[in-house]
Image (cartoon, rainbow, N blue to C red):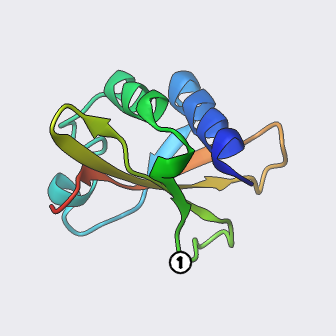
Amino acid sequence: MGFRDARAKLLDCLRSGNFGHWPWDDLFLKNWLAAGRISESQVIRLLLRCDGSQYGIGTQISPAGAQVHEFFPRDGEVEWYIKAYLDEEGGPAVIEAVFMSIHPSGV
């Protein structure tokens, strides 16, 4: 799966509320969405700012064996880091996004 498909599916999951979070010990630093420091609509806006040059496939393997998608959108002077995978164990009709990291780069 490439940039356009991954971004589209993540956006669909955010809009429908069909997403979860990676269980970091310190969500406050690693996952601003899970910690309530950023809203779903702000993450949607960040993903919409991305183009293909701000995307990559992560080297980390998800527990579901799915590709890990990394996005590096800019918001003004701040570059963000968004890492997620799509859990499709329930089939194509039941896709859940799992956000592993959402924070400014360098945090």
Rendered-image quadrant of the C terminus: bottom left
Which of the two residues, 14 or 53, is positioned nearer the viewer here? 53
For label 1, the SS is loop
Q: In which quadrant of the rendered view does residue 7 lie?
A: top right
Left or right? Give the position of 61 relative to 106: right
Residue 90 place in picture, x, y as percent = 79, 50
Residue 5 place in picture, x, y as percent = 71, 41
Residue 104 place in picture, x, y as percent = 21, 50
Left or right? Give the position of 58 relative to 46: right
Q: Could you classify mark 1 by the number of other residues whose Cα lies within 10 Å: few (under 14), some (14-19), or many (20 or more)?
A: few
Residue 64 place in picture, x, y as percent = 66, 68
Q: Is residue 46 above or below residue 87?
A: above
Rendered-image quadrant of the N terminus: bottom right
Name the residue rendered at 42%, 30% in the picture: 49
Name the residue rendered at 41%, 60% in the picture: 22
Left or right? Give the position of 35 relative to 73: left
Q: Is residue 90 above or below residue 59?
A: above
Tell me the residue that label 1 is attached to.
59
Left or right? Give the position of 92 relative to 10: right
Name the residue rendered at 51%, 30% in the picture: 14
Q: Is residue 83 above or below residue 79?
A: below
Q: In which quadrant of the rendered view does residue 42 lie?
A: top left
Name the residue rendered at 52%, 39% in the picture: 51
Q: Amino acid at mark 1?
A: Thr
